[in-house]
Image (tube, rainbow, N blue to C red):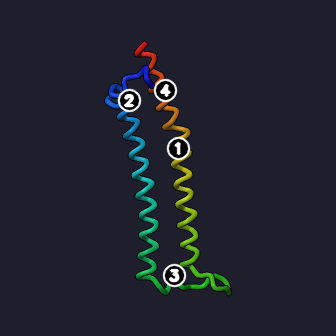
């Protein structure tokens, strides 16, 4: 990266737009995860009867299923972010840096 002016990259409109998209998706996915966890906590506090309903004849209840769902959901959200970064953000950043390198030569 020695052939690019780093301050020029950070101050460019294209980079600011790209960084804004990354920030937006990070906030959205974080909010969705926090909302899902908050719903679980509220259900545990205020809907105990519902959360203790057994599923089948075993010791598994709705609360346990919800916890498993939250764990899987967090992994899915993380996986989506990694996919989005690899497919959208990283190529766009590479293109931006490539264009800036060409502009400096």
| In the image, residue 55 above or below residue 76 | below
Q: Classify 10 Å Cα crowding around label 3: few (below 14), some (14-19), many (20 and above).
A: some
Left or right placement of residue 9 versus residue 63 in this view:
left
Secondary structure type for disc 1: helix
Mark 1 or mark 4, which is nearer the start of the sequence?
A: 1
Give the position of the N terminus as an image quadrant: top left
Q: How far apart are marks 3 and 4 (CA)?
A: 50 Å
Quadrant of the rendered image containing residue 72: bottom right
> What is the distance, in whole Å, between disc 4 and disc 1 at their CAs?
16 Å
Residue 51, above or below 7: below
- Seen at 56% across and 56% down, the residue is 76
Q: Check residue 14 in the rendering and tell me which mark sits there, or answer none.
A: 2
Left or right position of 14 against 81: left
Mark 3 and mark 1 in contact? Answer it, CB < 8 Å: no
Residue nearest the viewer, comparing 45 with 102: 102
Q: Nearer the viewer, mark 3 or mark 1?
A: 1
Residue 51 - label: 3
């Amino acid at each position: 990266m020695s052939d690019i002016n780093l301050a020029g990259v950070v101050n460019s409109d294209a980079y600011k737009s790209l960084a804004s998209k990354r920030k937006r998706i990070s906030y959205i996915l974080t909010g969705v995860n926090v909302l899902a966890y908050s719903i679980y906590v509220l259900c545990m506090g205020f809907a105990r009867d519902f959360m203790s309903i057994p599923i089948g004849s075993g010791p598994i209840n709705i609360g346990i299923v919800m916890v498993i769902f939250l764990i899987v959901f967090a992994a899915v959200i993380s996986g989506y972010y990694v996919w989005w970064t690899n497919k959208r953000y990283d190529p766009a950043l590479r293109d931006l840096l490539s264009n800036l390198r060409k502009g400096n030569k």
